[in-house]
Image (cartoon, grey):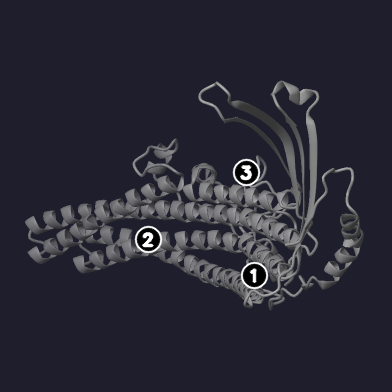
Amino acid sequence: MPFLSVDRLCKPTRTLRRTLAVLPATLLVACASTAQFDTNSLTADVPGTWSAHAGGGAVDATSLVRWWRRFNDPALNLLVERAMQLNTSVEAAQASVRQAQALRDVAAAALLPTLSGVASVSHSAVGGTGSTGSTHTTSTQAGLNADWTPDVFGANRHALAAGQAVADASVASLGDMQVQVACEVGLGYIALRAAQARWTIARDSLASQQETLQITLWRQQAGLVTELDAAQARTAAEQTQALLPALNTTIEQTRHALSVLAGQPPNTRLPLSASLAASSPIPSAGDDLTLGIPAETLRQRADVRASEYQVSAALARVAQADAARWPNFSISGTLSYSAATLGALSSGAGLASTLLAGVTLPLFDGGAARAQVRAQQAGLDLARTSYRTAVLTALQEVEDALVALRSDQLRLLSLRDAATDASRASELAREQYSGGLIDFQTVLSTQRTQLTTQDALAQASADVSTDQVRLFKALGGGWRADSSPTGTTQADDPYPRAAAQTTHL
């Protein structure tokens, strides 16, 4: 590397003046030489409409904020909002945001000069033995060192752009993690209420079967029925009794999962433990929901936006690798004071200054620089593919949720009517059996049908609520991009905000 130096900062040499004079022309050549990349080439095929509609008012990111409140369940509200703050995955995502923002600041610092202070004291003795006839010399020096690498070809600027895109992607990923956590809490809570509802159904059915068993035993003693009827009644009651421990296991395990999602040990008693222990109806969000156009839905999804930011980062890395193939300029300077003693630095010290300007010309690197450009271009292709994958996955999730919700709603309507009829049939059968009008097989059949139908109704209700949660998540979960990325939870918005950027669909 050729260097140019002067002994005084205020008196540059003729060669240095010539070098500085041609620097503007070099900058123009650099700007013309740096590769340009089209950021609008990010495309994906998106249909104009969805295959089904849910009916009701329009849906956008704002209307989906705190979607769990649509279920009108205070316990669910508390669980979700607690998990949004204390969930370990959310905390890890928040740490990733801070890390990405710090690395972006590191890239930004590379555009600025560096200034450091130096100080030294040296002492030497020459000749003689001990202190006799020896010469002692003390030297004290203090000064400043300055270094600057002009970003002629834009490598540092592209590195900063990549760092900013990664930081924005990490903020969007934090939002996506919170969307997923809220969804998992919603699904877990619905599963808990469904298990509690099924346990209640099984308990009530067991009580009815035990009453029937008692009636059968009385009729057996009276010689009206055989021992076979009593054995069948006892078997039906025992089979129903066997359902309770399994359902209780599901209830306890679901509580444990909800505790972990809320950032607490499985056996921790949450503030709402009493409400979780008590049986409560399976929550439902209602049917007042329609969808916006698919392209708008994708812009509401944090994972799609994060993938887009990753494409922007990959674009910047390609430009950074291309800029690294061109000459690298550097300017450094030193200003120092020297004196025999430390006190003499303030007066009568010798002043020395040095200015160095250099340029590094890449002549031969075995093709490493070009290979690095190809590697980053491959990374860009990978990021674009990941973006298309995110878009297609988002579209599939919405379509799947719509199909499941529509089918389960129809199934729920049928099971409601069936459960009502089954309950009435079981009640009539017990009354007629008590009066000796029908045989025990009819009673046994109607009781089994009632238990099966009511259990299926509880599961269908949970399925509809589960489909609603998954649809809310597929529509973006209430996350929205904003012009001020913070990476922190706002009081009026449970999701972090990422810098606004145009999404090309």
Observer-side mark, 2 or 1, equals: 1
What is the secondary structure assignment of the residue under circle 2? helix
Residue 454 is marked as 2
Q: Which residue is the site of mark 1?
A: 53
Is 335 on the left-hand or right-hand side of 416? right
Residue 34 appears in view: yes
Looking at the picture, which amino acid does disc 1 mark? His
- Spot occupied by residue 488 in the image (x, y as percentages of width and height): 63, 44
Badge 3 amino acid? Thr
Residue 424 shows in this picture: no
Mark 3 or mark 2, which is nearer the start of the sequence?
2
Q: From the image, tell me which residue sits under label 3.
A: 489
Q: Nearer the viewer, mark 3 or mark 1?
A: 3
Report how far apart the C-alphas of labels 2 and 1 lie in the structure: 29 Å
- In front of the other: 192 or 348: 348
* Few, some or many residues within 10 Å of mark 3 (<14, 14–19, 20+): some
Image quarter where the C terminus lies is: bottom right
Task: Tell me: 160 left or right of 123.
Answer: right
The reply, left or right, for residue 451 in relation to residue 340 is left
